[in-house]
Image (cartoon, helix red, strand yellow):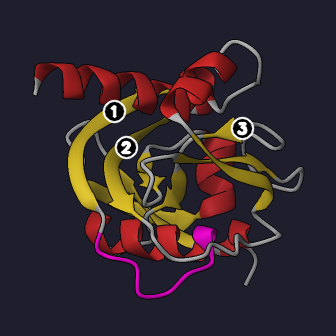
Amino acid sequence: MSAADEILDVVDENDRVVGRFPRGQVYAEGLRHRCVFVRARDAEGRVFVHRRTATKLVFPSLYDMFVGGVVGAGEAYDDAALREAEEELGVSGLPRPEFRFKFLYDAGAAGSWWSAVYEVRCDLPVRPQVEEVAWHGFLAEEEVERRLSVWEWVPDGLAAYERLKAHRATG
């Protein structure tokens, strides 16, 4: 099954399921769905950063400081966070990511999606999926901040990053 054929829950403004459609249709029609964003850090506290492959359905070739993706139909956010983190990092046995908060991301004409933000520590050697990740590295927080104005970042990941910083500042 291709990524475009994966079935997703379509949700309302209160994150209640109102239907199920193939991912390709959800993206094409800008239907509201669910996503997870997992910020992975290594034992030294550095952040996993990667550039998406050119073949990704959305935001191809852009940089991201989160791993994650869509929540499948009937799947819980917590389960999707662990699945997506293990898939994209290329590891198994990762600790369950810790939920931080959820927000509704609005991409204008492209639609909107409920976005659950998580954090996880990954002490395992990573082997990112070549079909998902074109480049990767663990960068110090200061280096990520320096690159914000230099690299082109996925807009929803950037929104999650700014919200995570604000969330940390307010405790």
Image quadrant in which the C terminus is located: top left
Residue 148 in the magenta stretch? The answer is no
Give percent across and percent down for residue 77.
30, 63
Closer to the camera, 167 or 123?
A: 123
Q: Determine the secondary structure under disc 1.
A: strand
Foreground mark, 1 or 3, reads 3
Residue 30 % position (x, y): 58, 39
**First to last magenta residue range:** 88-96
Which mark is on residue 63? 3
| Front disc: 3 or 2 | 3
Measuring 61% from the left and 61% from the top, which residue is drawn there?
23
Which residue occupies the foreground of this view, 21 or 132?
132
The amino acid pointed to by label 3 is: Tyr
Structural distance between the alpha carbons of marks 1 and 3:
21 Å
* Disc 1 target residue: 104
Mark 1 or mark 2: which comes first in sequence? 1
Residue at image coords 89%, 50% = 54
Image position of 97 with respect to 171: above or below:
below
* Other-residue count near label 1 (Cα within 10 Å), few / some / many at <14 / 14–19 / ≥20: some
Q: Is residue 16 visible?
A: no
* Residues at circles 1 and 2 in contact by the CB criterion of under 8 Å: yes
- In the displayed structure image, the side of residue 94 where residue 140 appears, left or right: right
Tell me the amino acid under the disc marked 2. Answer: Ser
Residue at point 49% right, 67% down? 85
Towards the viewer: 118 or 102: 118
Q: Which mark is residue 115?
A: 2
Q: Is residue 93 magenta?
A: yes
Q: Between disc 3 and disc 2, whose residue precedes?
A: 3
Disc 1 residue type (three-letter): Leu
| Label 3: which secondary element | strand
Q: Furthest-front residue in view?
A: 44
